Image (cartoon, coloured by chain):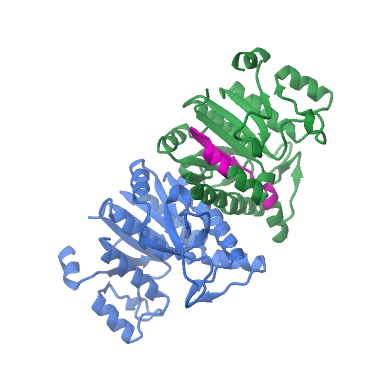
Chain colours: A blue, B green
Amino acid sequence: MPEISVIKIGGNVVDNPEALARFIKDFTSLPGKKILVHGGGKEATRMSAKLDIPTTMIEGRRVTTRETLDVVTMVYAGLVNKRIVSMLQAQGCNAIGLTGADANAIKATRRKPQPIDFGYVGDIAPEGVNSELIGSLLDAGITPVYCAITHDGHGTLLNCNADTIASSVAIGASRIAPTELIFCFEQPGVMEDIERPDSLIPLITPDIYAGLKSFGIVNKGMIPKIDNAFNAIAAGVESVTIKHSDALTVPAGTRIHSKLNTLNSTL
Amino acid sequence: MPEISVIKIGGNVVDNPEALARFIKDFTSLPGKKILVHGGGKEATRMSAKLDIPTTMIEGRRVTTRETLDVVTMVYAGLVNKRIVSMLQAQGCNAIGLTGADANAIKATRRKPQPIDFGYVGDIAPEGVNSELIGSLLDAGITPVYCAITHDGHGTLLNCNADTIASSVAIGASRIAPTELIFCFEQPGVMEDIERPDSLIPLITPDIYAGLKSFGIVNKGMIPKIDNAFNAIAAGVESVTIKHSDALTVPAGTRIHSKLNTLNSTL
C-alpha cells in the first residue's frame, strides 16, 4: 500500500470551476499523506493573449520567452496556485503552494537550445527534487501544492511541464515512503477511441504500450504522460494511474505497470 | 538584542533591479533569523494598465475589485514573490514564498464596505498570524518571504497593505522571540523635508510624532507606516526602524520608540 499519494490535475480541470471544486473536496477527503501538482496552461495562454504576447507550442510544449516566463510565473505560481491553496484551506486541508524555488523544492537545468530552443524551460535531474522538504512538510501535516515553475539555483525561474513535475515529485517522495502517482484529467483514462467511453484501456504494460503506439491507438497528447509514468515506475514509484478528476476516490482509470504479472500479484 | 528580524521592502525597491539585487545580498548577509515582507504595487498598477483594468486608490490604498484581486495575486504572489525567492536562493538564503493562504500563514477578515468599499481587502486580527509556522520554518533554517496577499479561510484571497503584513508578522514573531521590525525603502528614513537629505528625523516617540503631525511635517505616505510601527511596539515588537534599503546592514534611519527614555536606555 502506498503511504504517499502524488496527484496531478490537468489544465482543463483547473479551468473548470465546478470540476475543480469537486476535485478539491475529493482530494481533501483522501486519507494519508498527499501532494498536489497542477497545470494551468489554458489560463496562461489566455493571459498571454490579453497581454499581446504570442503563444508558440512545439510538440505540445510551450516555448518560453522572457515575457512568457513572466506570464507563466504569474499564472501558475500566483493566480492558479493560490486559488487552489485557498480552496484547500477552506476545506480544512493545510496546503502550502510551492514553486521549485521555494525552499529549493525542485532544482532544474535550463534545456539546451538544440535541437529546439524552448527558451526558459527546465529539465529536472533525478536528484533535483528536495525529498527532505517533502518529508518534513508531510510530517508536519502540511500538503505541498506544486505548480510547474522551477529554478536553476542561480536566480532564474524555469518553466516545466506539470506532468514531469508530478513524476519527479513522485520519484522524490518514493525515497521517503512507498508512493503512488495519479494523473487526473477530464477523461476516464487512456482510451482506444476518445469518442467511445467504453474503450478505456484498463492496463498498460511496456508491451501493451508498444502495441498501442505501433497501431497509432494512443493519441499524441497521452504519450508524454505515459512515458512519464513508466519513468516514475522505473525510478521507484509503486504505481501510476491515469483517471478522470471526478474518480479520484474510487478505483477507475488506466493503470500503468512495468509487468503484467506485477499487476496480477497486486490485484 | 532581537533574535528575529522582520524586514519589509517597498514597491520602489522591488521595482528597481539594481537596488533589489543590492538589498537581496545585504539581506542574505544579515546574521540570525529573518523574515522578508515585500510590496509590489507599482508592478501591479502597470499590469492592471496592460490588462485595461482601472486602478483606483483611496487614501493610498488600492480598491480591489475581483479583477484587481487576480492582478495583485498574479503580481505579488507570482511574479514578484518568486523573483525575490529565486534571487535569495541564488545567494544561498533558503527562502520560501508565502501568501496568507499558504499553510494558513495569515488569516484576515474582509473589510466592511462602510465607509469606503475597498473590495477584496483584508484586515488582520492579532491572532491572524500563524506564529507556530514562523517558528518551525525559522528553526528549520528557512526564511519566510511574505507578499501582501492573505485569505479569509473560506476560500477567498484578500489584498492587504504590505506595511500592515510586516507589522502583523513582526507581532506574530515577537510571541516566539524578541523581534525587530525594519521598513526599508528608497529614502534615508522619515524626513522633515524630503528634498533635504540632512533633515532625517533620527527618533520618533509618540510625543514627537504628535508634534510632527500637528506641524504637517510628516508627509501623508509616512503616516500609516509610523502608525503601524507604534502598533507593533505596543503589541510586543522590540524596536522599529525606517531606513534606506541600501543601509540594511548599518545603523541608520529613523527609530520609532514608545518612550524617549526607552531609547536612551538601549543606546
- In this rendering, the answer to whether B232 lies above or below A29 is above
Residue B137 falls in image quadrant: top left
- In this rendering, the answer to whether B53 lies above or below A112 is above
Identify which residue is drawn at 82% across, 36% down: B195
Specify whether residue A160 is in view: yes
Identify which residue is drawn at 37% across, 81% down: A193
Q: Position of residue B105 (x, y in %)?
A: 49, 39
Locate residue A229 relative to residue A145 in the image: left or right: left
Q: Is A256 part of what is drawn in magenta? A: no
Locate residue B251 relative to residue B198 in the image: left or right: left
- Which residues lie in the magenta part? B25-43
Q: Quadrant of the N terminus of chain A?
A: bottom left
> How many numbered badges does the structure rendering display?
0
Q: Nearer the viewer, residue A145 or A21?
A: A145
Q: Nearer the viewer, residue A145 or B14?
A: B14
Identify which residue is drawn at 79% across, 25% down: B213
